Image (tube, rainbow, N blue to C red):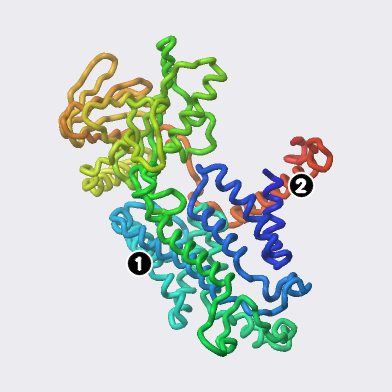
Amino acid sequence: MCILYLIMLISAGGIMLGWNYKLSCVTFALPYWYMFLLDKSSWNNHSYMFGLLVLLFLATDSHSLWSVDAYKGVIPNNRHVPLWNYAVLRFQLFLLYFYAGLKKTEFDWINGYSMASLSDHWVFFPMKVFLDKDQIDLWIIHVFGFLIDLTMGFLIYFDKTRALSFYILTSFHLMNSQMFHIGMFPFVCLATMPLFCGFNWPRQFFLMQMNRFKFLVENDTAKNPICYYEEDVKDGPYVPKKRQCVTVVMLYMHAVIQLFLPYSHFVTLGYNNWTNGLYGYSWDMMVHTWDTSRIAVKLVNFDTNESMFIDPEAWVQNNRWQRHADMIYQYSKCVKKNVKALKKMNNMALYIDIWVSLNKRFHQRMFDPRVDILSVKWSPFERVSWVMPLLDELTPIRDELRVIEKKILSSSNHSDVLFMADFPGFTLENYVHEDLENITLQLIKGKVSVSIENKSTILAEGGIMKVPSATFHNVSTISESPSAFMYVFYNKTKHNYEDKSTQTPLTEIISAKIDNFINAIALLSRAVLRILHSTPMIRRIKIEESDTLYV
């Protein structure tokens, strides 16, 4: 894998310098898309965008000027670039902004439910002079963020509004680079902004510095045989060349696919859950915030009638699988394969119970815990029957939950609250950790039966009771409508842990990025040495003056 990254690193340098440009695009795209498709749990809109851009670069003549290929004569130096080269890149970047804005027309985003507590970040410190935290979260992050995405694709295209859009987008992307862990995406967006300027802006810029950069602009431009020139049409209508016809067809195909794919959820039904659309392709950045509170993976051995619980972090690298039915399906096959190999178990069933909150709603079951995932069928074009519906009837009381949460958190820095909801006829088997104290269970909606050590208590709306820690208890919904309840508790772990710094200093952030780059180079060098010498090469890393680690 390190070798693939080394190939991509060299290829990226070739693309940047215009050295073996077409080959560099191919050698970058192949390993990139291979790794991208290898692990769909890491897919997102940003990585998808990078893959699209390199494919578009491959189709363009971006190396026609100021490139190593042009300097060496591989291609004619300073030749014209077809206008569609600019148009297709502008179109793709326009969709990035505009579709992101369209996706933010959802009720949750417009009303400030999607992102939480971002106003605490230092980038919003100047705004706190005239706005409080709630106003920053709603108006600056949600409303203004929506307007930026929806309008910037238009404003950056026109000369009169381009300067304003540059200022707003520069601020927007720099702030995002500090608030979110999204890698190079903000900086790539910054680098692509000049594509919306006039095609000859670099030449005009260097003409202003004629004496210093005369060698960059003194050559005359050359015609490109694949371009269309009006002066070449002498008699009759212009007959396009075969290559030009193929290019037009490919451009239309690309445009249709990119316009359709983000709204293809009525076709790809198997990938839908509480939200529609293929994850990583829909440009719905930051619209959905997921908070997982409980995961139970239960394995039943039919041969012995024994039940066991599996660590949900076993055999996975991240928690992305917990929110997507297709990944749950694949995860079940992975569990079966590994359990069969480790325990020699052949006749088994797997039940998964995951509680998730979407955009500050109640925590609720996402998948039916009564369904054996090993026995279900999944198709990308059929709706998943074992995805539990979102309890929309409880959504209107989210504002009440905000008020309750603020009141509880203001009473103590170490108090907390968890809002949960369940379906009629279902039972929540819950264990309260010993680090939690003063736990109360209060019913908000519906009717439940709470069982603790064979003792049952019926709670109606507004009912409240104590729950002991370090014990199991069951909460059964016995009403005909969904139940909604909340746990209020004191967190001893939170009390014992004192966070002395809420923000990481900028120097530490830069230092960490430098360390990561050095470690990446070290990994690449070790991979090359291993290939050259056909054996792992030991590299000494000094950790402290008295300690040495060999890796």
Q: Earlier in the sequence, mark 1 or mark 2?
A: 1
Q: Which residue is mark 2?
A: 525
For the C terminus, the quadrant is: top right
Residue at the spot x=75%, y=83% of the render?
Answer: 215
In percent of width and height, residue 84 lies at: 54, 73
The dot on residue 130 is 1
For the N terminus, the quadrant is: top right
In percent of width and height, residue 483 lies at: 21, 33
Residue extending furthest front?
236
In percent of width and height, residue 527 lies at: 75, 43
Does residue 405 lie above or below 331 as drawn?
A: below
Circle 1 crowding by C-alpha within 10 Å: few under 14, some 14–19, many from 20? few
172 sits left or right of 460 in the view: right
| Quadrant position of residue 362 | top left
| Quadrant position of residue 329 | top left
Which residue occupies the foreground of this view, 342 or 408?
342
Residue 221 visible in the current orientation: yes
